[in-house]
Image: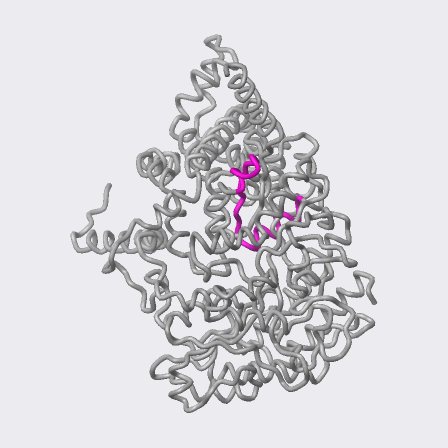
Amino acid sequence: MARAVSSNRKLLNTLIAWTIGLIIFFPILWTILTSFKTEAQAIADPPIFFFFDWTTENYSVVQERSNYMRFLWNSIIIAGVSTILGLIIAIPAAWSMAFVPSKRTKDILLWMLSTKMLPAVGVLYPIYLIFIQLGILDTRIGLIVVVMLINLPIIVWMLYTYFKEIPGEILEASRMDGASLKDEILYVLAPMAVPGIASTLLLNFILAWNEAFWTLNLTAAKAAPLTAFIASYSSPEGLFFAKLSAASTMAIAPILILGWFSQKQLVRGLTFGAVK
Amino acid sequence: MKLRNALIAASAIVSVAATAASADELTIATVNNGDMIRMQGMTDDFTKKTGHTVEWVTLEENVLRQRVTTDISTKGGAFDIMTIGMYETPIWGANGWLVPLDDLSDEYDADDILPAMAGGLSHDGTLYAAPFYGESSMIMYRTDLMEKAGMEMPEAPSWSFIAKAARAMTDRDEEINGICLRGKAGWGEGGAFITAMSNSFGARWFDEDWNAQFDTREWSDTLNFYKNMMDDAGPPGYATNGFNENLSLFQQGKCGMWIDATVAASFVTNPKDSTVADKVGFALAPDNGLGVRSNWLWAWALAIPAGTKKEAAAKEFIEWATSNGYIELVAEKEGWANVPPGARTSLYKNPNYKKVPFAQMTLDSILSADPNNSTVDPSPYVGVQFAAIPEFAGIATEVSQEFSAAYAGQQTIEEALAKAQALTNDAMEAAGYR
């Protein structure tokens, strides 16, 4: 039976939720505000919050200096294709681990996760040399493969967790009705796991979008995504915080909008199976 | 007449085709600072003159350093030109990783490059990178606060004068700090400053047998002097301040003096960003009467990685970007105060440039730093605020972390120096120097 909650308690909960939300969102808000300031206002002490002469000059400078659309396009291709490719590989992998587990399944899952524990810089040189040999340095295809591989353990783990929530009897029943393995995954499992697959897709798209180490180290001019675009505005010898903030806002805007529109799906997927 | 027109048209087509056929697309890795960004805006002039086009890869200094080091050491070939500094150039030149720039055209006038810059960017007398701009360090001070303190800044002050002035200018109620200096960990941040300062106190990183020298009185004097002065007259949290933090403080009128890169002069005198633009004076970095001043020497320079397939076009670009012609182009479009400083002798003879308030002090500072003779006692390394050996960046980063911890009061200076001594000797032994 649902517990009655007093209106005062509701108000308090709402206040706490908004406060936590604002604290989490504050760095992004501050970045957006700074992008509309002059460089002098950006470093003012005490900091200026809302009451300043808003200017779009930084955005004009950034647009003039950088080919934003090229960086954006590279980000979309790298994040999008690597996520889809990762799902294509991870769905059958997670299916086999969830529904046909062997005695080594748990070990394999742990081993996959352990690859995420290695500091990326430790394998920079080997991967760089492989890229040179294959001629895929500064190409989108090379980055798609690397980003897909580094996110694959997370995709498999997330899908495995979602698939474990689906009763195996349903799949058994479909098999008894004559469904092939392909039919079982495509027409029985996938529709039931749509919220989980969707949230995995969204979360991994965000991770791939924000990936900075490999995208900075394996690109030059042609395949560089928005992470390189932001890095080009950071400087230890010169105060360009307002321009850096404008570049950051432009880089996070697409993913922020995507997250905003798909937040229902994300929350639904992330809490899938949490309450039984 | 028809024949003549046909011939002219044919020769024009041939000439355009020839230019197009020989035109290359250069990929250039560079650092994000005002002068480099300005150069990117001028690239059309280069393309118009040569037909070559340019793709820029602009990165933050530390990211750039890691990125180009990975590429050149693996012969990746991602870049046709790299922006590197005085630290990397002699090491990479010795490794055979860079194309020697010993065949630049007569028109380029390589002899016009400031000798200190050419020396720091060479290995065994061969130039491996052409300086785009050079810098030293100097004192920038508030003329009004100095006057209020009843003192007058000499052109070449001593450390004792600076400490006295710093304490006299400090006004904690008004949030005025007498002096702002780098304390942030990092070999290129606080590490660079304290190394240059230690030179003037008679300290050095290594003796002639590559033994660390942090157990000497000179290093102890340097760190104690720095900490006492900064505790009395520096800004709160100075142990984490680098160039940008001090620039911000100075521009807001919260520093009486700031000793840092000469390129900062154009920032602090720019009324658009600085609240004290019309109250800034300049002086040479301080000394201790030992014959060595505490200013450093640095250049951002353009180099060609060995193995690039576009060497000829890359040399054309370097000749264009580091020439007197480029300086004149910038002067014409953005004024003499914005030309890249510190690279060419002739710039400092130019009457138009002499009118820029910080021009002469920048030159004097650059000329007073000698990378081949930077310490009072002899040392086995080249470099003023660094030792040009591959191991230095790693060691100096750790050493500067120990120093910053001492500035912040997390350990004593003696403890920091003892740790620096041990870790430096260990690293040098592991690298086979000792």
**Residue B388: x, y in percent?**
72, 62
Regarding residue A119, the answer to whether it shows in the image is no
**Which residue shows up at 57% across the image and 39% down it?**
A219
Q: Is residue A88 visible?
A: yes
Nearest the viewer among B160 and B119 is B119
Q: Relative to B264, is A187 above or below?
A: above
Locate residue B292, reporting x and y percent. 66, 79
> How many marks do you count on the picture?
0
Q: Position of residue B217 (x, y in %)?
A: 70, 85
- Of the pair A52 and B251, the residue shown nearer to us: B251
Most distant residue in the bottom direction: B150
**Image-based side of B419 in relation to A38, left or right:** right
> Which color mode does the image show?
one colour
Left or right of residue B133, residue B145 in this image: left
* Residue A29 x, y percent position in the rendering: 32, 52
A130, above or below A242, in the image: above
Q: Residue furthest front?
A: B1
Segment tinted magenta in the rendering = B46-71
State the quadrant of the C terminus of chain B.
bottom right
- Does the magenta run of residues contain B281? no
Give whichever of B111, B222 is nearer the camera.
Answer: B111
Report the magenta stretch's main SS. helix
In this image, B174 relative to B295: left or right? left
Q: Residue at x 48, y 87 (%)?
A: B165
Furthest-left residue in view? Answer: A7
On screen, A193 above or below B27? above
Depth check, front residue: B106 or B48: B106
- Going by the image, does B377 lie left or right of A261? right
Residue B295, quarter of the rendered image: bottom right
